[in-house]
Amino acid sequence: MGRAWSIFHERPKALVLGIVLAFALLGPHISGQTSPILQPCGGESNGATSCPPGIPIGGPPWFGATPLMDGSTSTFWPPNGENSQIVTLYGSYGNSETGGAQSHHDQGITQSSLIVPRDLNGNPSTNGAIVFLFIGFSNCDIEICGGNSDIWAGDSNQQHVYGQPCATTCPNPVFPNAQSPIPWNQPTQNGDTDIEQSFLYQVYSPSKPLVGPHVYIFDGAFGGQTLDKWDPTAIGYYSTHICSFPNPFGPVIVPECNYYRVQSSLAANGFSENQVQAIFLKASDSAPQCDLSTQHCLTGVTEPDAFTGERYMGDIMRFLRCCVGGSNSPRYPNLQQVFISSRTYGGYPTDPNHNACSLNPEPYAYEEGFSVQRLIVAQINGMSDGYSGDVHFNPNPTPGGAPWFDWGPYLWASADTPRSDGLVWCNGQTTGFCKGLRDVRYGDLFNQTMYWGDFTHPTYQGQGKVATLLVNFIQTSPWLTWILPPPPH
């Protein structure tokens, strides 16, 4: 997994450039200010909770650490303590799946060979579809599909918030023509002409799509749907909360709430769950309560969120293998591969009055990388690490174990310090690699009291960075040969 991806750096429009030069390091902190009642995008994220001590971590200087893709087996985070983790993508295996992990890598290639077009009943068919399903929370939704509106639609100076999309329902591709109608979102309100470079846009906007004619990228992510809301077990959110999404049972408690929502969306576009053969997951737990160093923990909380997130993802992986509603019937009987990406940089929200704690600030965004790392290593080793549960590879759609899974692109970089492939996350710095760039929502910088930014969700520039990483991933991964267009004759 030592691949490097080239990162493009878009330049903002003249108006935004003038704003960021004038307010370069303003950030969201307004001393003595109380939080507005209103939320960006109508509260697409979970509500605020108490912050652990010392969180959010202020800046500048912004929170920094070594990206997992640039670490080594002799680098640890935190540097001291019983919860220290190896700073690489694969723990003690380093940054590539060689040696003891080679069989896991090879298994991914084997699973790739099993992905073929299938009809609605799941039977191989030359007229069928391969659905690559993306699930997760609002950031994932914005990065995959884009938004058809910007934050703070009520701002009288709407041009001040151009290029800051909300997570909105995705039209998605419709069988059999993935390009018609347009499957991605673009802003349609208030004159915003910024072109959102979402993943669906980059894949399907060329006259010749970047994927084969049978491949349908499908966005099942949704605002506020954090890891606990994709976990259908007893510790999952919807095991104790009403499901208001479309489902066969009405507004009642449905632990698999999100999966029924996705099922309904698939069916509306001409697909079935039998055609879902690969899944991408990007989410996190919201309102984190304890970090790996245990220096930032709420009273009485002892389990770091990195381990809690691993529990959620272990439950999700086992569910993706099998089964629906406690039966022996798998929801995705032809699922062959799952790819997981952890969070982007989360160190810019510095004002607790703007509910930064309800999102996923640093060091929690960084530490989610260890949740993914540990889960993958647990599958490589074929045994639980105490938090993952049993996630050994089970090739059959039956209870026990999990489907084959591994990293998607690794998205975290240490603020404006470039990692080895050049990726940075910007917040209007006036110098260096981030000069004049904002990758996270900054709201209306002329009126932070009313129209504040959460400095966490991606702007159209941040969205484009993630989408480009995904494009490079699907075009270079040895596990995704099924996704590419056929070679020219």
Image (tube, rainbow, N blue to C red):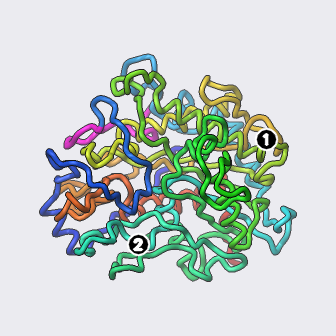
| Residue 343 placement, left or right of 449 | right
Residue 121 lies, with reference to residue 340, above or below; the image says below
Name the magenta segment's main secondary structure.
loop
Q: Quadrant of residue 195?
A: bottom left
Give the alpha-carbon distance from disc 1 to disc 2, as whole Å: 39 Å
Q: Count of labels shown?
A: 2
Residue sitting nearer the eye, 91 or 136: 136
Circle 2 Cα neighbour tier, 10 Å, few/some/many (<14 / 14–19 / ≥20): many
Answer with mark 1 or mark 2, whichever residue precedes in sequence. Answer: 2
For the point 79% across and 60% down, which residue is it?
A: 274
Give residue 326's mark: 1
For the point 83% across and 72% down, which residue is it?
A: 126
From which residue to which does the magenta span run? Answer: 56-72
| Residue 135 placement, left or right of 249 | left
Q: Amino acid at mark 1?
A: Gly
Report whether residue 420 is seen. Answer: no
Q: Is 181 within the magenta?
A: no
Residue with the mark numbered 2:
149
Give residue 394's mark: none
Q: Position of residue 420 (x, y in %)?
A: 38, 47
